[in-house]
Amino acid sequence: MNLIVCLKQTFDTEEKVNIENGKVSEDGAKFIINPYDEYALEEAIRLKERFGGEVTAVTIGTDQAESALRTALAMGADKAVLVNDERLFGDEFTTSKVLAAVVKDKDYDLILSGYMSVDNGGGQSGLRLAEELDIPHVNAITKLEVQDNQVVVERDVEGDIEVIESNLPILITAQQGLNEPRYPSLPGIMKAKRKPIEELKAEDLAVDLDQIGSKTKIIDQVLPPKRQEGRILQGEINEQVNELVQLLQGEVNFNG
Ligand SMILES: Cc1cc2nc3c(=O)[nH]c(=O)nc-3n(C[C@H](O)[C@H](O)[C@H](O)COP(=O)(O)OP(=O)(O)OC[C@H]3O[C@@H](n4cnc5c(N)ncnc54)[C@H](O)[C@@H]3O)c2cc1C
């Protein structure tokens, strides 16, 4: 079973994020594999371990993104492709066109991506890729079973579960809960250092650069407003209750 995982390197949103000139500053930022893409990768590796075949991780990014691919190889991916060409960096429209150009001639049964990236959060690239390839897709899945040429997937729909059956090939996007990604083992890390990473430029792909430019433009990026400090009421309990009632009345009046 041949599996392709679309994997994006993002800055770690759990760490402090700085904005400079309307853009997230990469100075001192810690870079990780987009967490939803880790679920996708883990699922692909489990399927390969069960059914055989190979896992190929594909990333569009700069030199720095090589470390995300090395981690993927250390976890158990067999091959890695890095599309490292500024002319191919763009919005979700561009990203899906480029990913499609990379995978369209590959032999695949299942393509896995994250359901969204934690940095830009577009939630579009995976689904757009499936449309480009003209294959079915299911978004934000939490369970996947493969039998012969069929997949049965589950997805959370606001507290309920939707069960969907489809044929291969298909693209699924991974949601939290799908699995618990493994840590790379030491032998895995050592082996990954020797595995080659295929690096591609625009000339290696059948893309018309005039046709794949971004359709959107990011005008500005801002951090959310600072949360106000909480206030602990002081005094006897009846004083606190009175003050709380007054505060709540103010809140109600304030909100109309
Ligand atoms: C190095 C770099 C430079 C960029 N420069 C520009 C620019 O100049 N102008 C501009 O408009 N946009 C640029 N972007 C792209 C933009 O910021 C978004 O990352 C892109 O449109 C994807 O959207 P998203 O992050 O919201 O992903 P989503 O649509 O939320 O991603 C969903 C899933 O798609 C897959 N995916 C997304 N991005 C990638 C990727 N890069 N490689 C492999 N799989 C991926 C992952 O599986 C991910 O979980 C750049 C991105 C990179 C990595």
Image: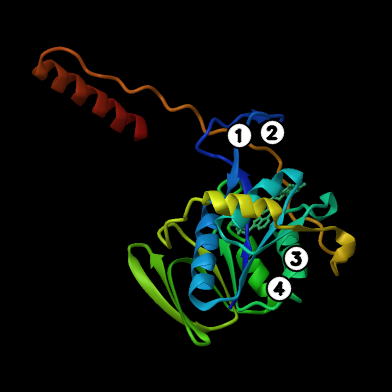
Three-letter code for the amino acid on which mark 3 is drawn: Lys
* Mark 3 secondary-structure assignment: helix
Residue identified by numbered label 4:
132
Q: CA distance from mark 2 to mark 3?
A: 27 Å
Q: Which mark is residue 22?
A: 2
Quarter residue 144 falls in: bottom left
Give whichever of discs 1 and 2 has the lower sequence position: 2
Say left or right for 110 vs 242: right
User: Depth-wise, is mark 2 or mark 3 nearer the camera?
Assistant: 3
Residue 18 figure quarter: top right
Tell me whether circle 1 and circle 2 mark residues in contact (CB < 8 Å): yes
In three-dimensional space, the C-alpha distance between marks 4 and 3, rounded to whole angstroms, equals 7 Å
Q: Residue at x 22, y 22 (%)?
A: 246
Q: Position of residue 231 (x, y in %)?
A: 29, 20
What residue is disc 1 on?
A: 222
Which residue ends up furthest to the top in the rendered image?
235
Mark 4 and mark 3 in contact? Answer it, CB < 8 Å: yes
Mark 3 neighbour density, 10 Å: few (under 14) some (14–19) many (20 or more):
many
Label 2 C-beta lies within 8 Å of the nearest ligand 1 atom: no
- Residue 248, percent across and down? 25, 28
Q: Secondary structure at mark 1?
A: loop
The earlier-in-sequence mark between 1 and 4 is 4
Instruction: Quarter of the image for the C terminus: give it.
Output: top left
- Between the C-alphas of marks 1 and 3, the distance is 28 Å
Q: Type of residue at label 1? A: Val
| The image quarter in which residue 130 lies | bottom right
SS of the residue under disc 2: loop
